[in-house]
Amino acid sequence: MCFSATASFAASGGLATIGVLSLRLAKKKQILIALIPIFLALQQLLEGFQWFAIGCGQSNLAIGYVYIFFAFLLWPFYVPLMVLIFDQKRKWLLTWLVGVGSTVTFTLFILLTLRPLTIHVLQNSIHYQIYTPYEFEIALAVIYALVVCGSLLLSSKKEFRWFGGLLLVSAAIAATFFFINFVSVWCFFAALLSSLIYFYLRQEQTKKHVA
C-alpha cells in the first residue's frame, strides 16, 4: 500500500495468497488473468521495500525502476492483450487498444530512459515522478487509464465490464483526492480490486461443473 511499509507488506501477502488460489483454479487460457494478483502483490512488496530505501541513492532508484516497470510499462500492454485473448467477439476494437497500449508503454519507456526518475515521500505516500511537461503528463495519464479501463469496459463479458467500471471509478477517486501520488494510490486500489479475480475464476469453475 502507498501509506506505509507495514500496509504494503500486508497487502502483498494477501494478494500473493489470492494469486496462488487463483492460479490453482485457472485453466490454461485463464492463467493470464490469474497472474494479475501475483504481479500486483510483487508491486506492493516492492513499495514496502521502497519505504526503507527512500533516500538511499541507488538502492532507492533500483527498487523504484522495477516498481515503475509494472506500473508504467506492463499494464497498458498486458490488460488489453489479456482481454483480447479472452474475448474474440470484439477483436478489432481490442486489437486497436492493444496497439494504443503498446504505444503508451513505448512512450513511457523512452521517457524513463531520457529523464531521471525521482522518488520521495509526499503527503504520507510515495511519489514517483518523471519530469515532463505538465500537459503531456496529464494527457498520457488519461490515455493510459482509458486503455486499461476501456479494454475491460469494451469486453463482451459482463464480469470484465464490471471490473473495468470499478477500476475507472478508483482512478477517478485517486485523481481527485490523491492527485500528486496518483500512481501509487491507484495501484493500491487496483491491487484491492484484483482480489475479485479469485471469485470470478471460482464462478467460472462452478459454471463448468454445473454444465
Image: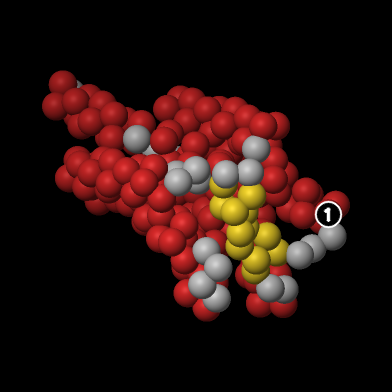
Quadrant showing the C terminus: top left
Q: In which image quadrant can residue 131 be found?
A: bottom right
Q: Which residue is mark 1?
A: 134
Q: Position of residue 60 (x, y in %)?
A: 51, 70
The answer to whether residue 173 of the structure is visible from this angle is: yes
Quadrant showing the N terminus: top left
Q: In which image quadrant can residue 195 be found?
A: top left
Inspect the image, locate mark 1, and give the three-letter code of the amino acid beneath it.
Answer: Tyr
21 lies left or right of 188:
left
Q: Position of residue 105 (x, y in %)?
A: 62, 62
Q: Nearer the viewer, residue 25 or 61?
A: 61
- Is residue 90 positioned above or below 12 on the image? above
Q: Nearer the viewer, residue 16 or 110?
A: 16
Q: Residue at x 26, y 26 (%)?
A: 203
Q: Position of residue 181 (x, y in %)?
A: 63, 46
Q: Residue at x 17, y 45 (%)?
A: 24
Q: Residue at x 55, y 76 (%)?
A: 57
- Is residue 203 positioned above or below 86 on the image? above
Q: Position of residue 34 (x, y in %)?
A: 31, 46
Q: Residue at x 19, y 26 (%)?
A: 206
Q: In which image quadrant can residue 86 be found?
A: top left
